[in-house]
Image (tube, rainbow, N blue to C red):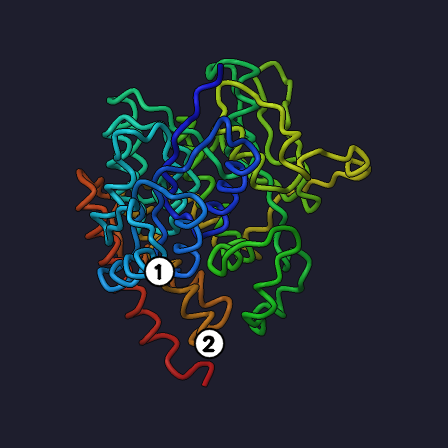
Amino acid sequence: MVLVKKLAILGSTGSIGTSTLSICESFPDRYQPVALAAGKNLDVAYEQCVRWRPRTISVATEELGAQLQSRLGADGITEVEVVYGTAGTIRVATLPEVDFVVSAIVGVAGLDATYAAVKAGKTIGLANKECLVAAGELIMAAAKEHNVALLPIDSEHNAVHQCMRGGTAREVRQIWLTASGGPFRSTPLSAFEQITPAQALKHPTWVMGQRITIDSATMMNKGFEVIEACRIFSLPPAQVRVTIHPQSTVHSMVEFIDGSILAQISVTDMRLPILYALAYPERVDASPAAGLHFDLSSLSQLDFAPPDLERFPCLRLAYEAAQTGGEACIALNAADEIAVAAFLEGQIPFLGIPRTIEQVLQQTSGRQPSSIQDVLEADLTARARARDVIAHQFSGVLR
């Protein structure tokens, strides 16, 4: 008899959250969502409550909570506890009946709840890379202390995790994270100053949110993944390599000391790494989830090439921050978020993103935070510095 695994989904209305709920639809005898953190999307939160009847749901603000409570009450749905804010998200993540927490809130907004879930002894499926970029040392130390399994959902780290099962940690020479190269891998450098938000939002492979799509175009997303891989797999930056692989069929590779390389290949569908994390250490038959079968004809051409750090300076900056550690990684993430938002709003050019980040990093030490509060304070400081750089360096540039 299979025991139903009870899930808390942080970021239930986003792409990872909805994909996780799709897995629950396909495997109702295995996975049941009992707690949701839905943020600001009230309509989707309401629909999820009607469909899943969670024990608890959290939304962003008290006002949204009151609106959701009213809508549910009008439909006679009174058994769903509605909470809000950071405290509400922490409650969702730490409910006693929850077995597995999917951490998929974008940015540092999910940090408090993820850390609380680790300290509560919950198994974590991690899709929020900012948690490990900004507070990786603290989260990994807490996971070790509380004997918590932290399972990556990001397709690249999930692939590495699968390949690592082919040997011991001591037998690993290096890991390779694959990157599509985004929409500008062959664009002339001379054209980068004229790149528009509309162009940068056209990812060749994945359908994602705006920030992560821009991060893919600058390859900052891959830089974050380098830092995340260093934390998850206890490797120095020099042993975490990036290769451009435009077909996106090989999700990552692990090279062992005897020269063997194991690669993980699958469809580009986030339901597969989610299902892997939820089922670990088992593997379950994915047949009930349509579309996860891989067509071998897709392997007719596989291209790999080293990334051009002149074309993608954000990747270079991420490696430098990974080497420094501490507040440098916090600043990298915070400055990127501010710079990406400014680019999307037309305040800075495309290359203004790495220029802003580099200036913020020059003002940042590598001091190690000793608490989540330290992380959040360093994050706020870096954001303020990024806004200051944008105000002074790019004012009127695109006007």
Foreground residue among 366 and 66: 66
User: Residue 301: image x %, image y %?
Assistant: 79, 39
Residue plotted at (78% across, 38% down): 298
Residue plotted at (29% across, 49% down): 78
Left/right placement of residue 358 relative to residue 169 reads left
Residue at numbered disc 1: 40
Left/right placement of residue 351 relative to residue 182 reads left
Mark 1 or mark 2, whichever is nearer to me: 1
Mark-to-mark CA distance, 1 and 2: 24 Å
Q: Earlier in the sequence, mark 1 or mark 2?
A: 1
User: Residue 300: image x %, image y %?
Assistant: 82, 37
Residue at numbered disc 2: 346
Foreground residue among 226 and 2: 2
Which label belongs to residue 361?
Answer: none
Q: Residue 334, located in which quarter of the rendered image?
A: bottom left
User: Residue 196: image x %, image y %?
Assistant: 56, 72
Left/right placement of residue 24 relative to residue 37 reads right
User: Residue 55: image x %, image y %?
Assistant: 31, 40
Foreground residue among 298 and 353: 298
Query: The disc labelled 1 sits on which kind of residue?
Result: Lys
Label 2 residue SS: loop
Is residue 40 depicted above or below 6 in this figure?
below
Query: The disc labelled 2 sits on which kind of residue?
Result: Gly
Cβ atoms under marks 1 and 2 closer than 8 Å:
no
Crowding near the residue tagged with mark 2, few <14, some 14–19, many ≥20 C-alpha atoms within 10 Å: some
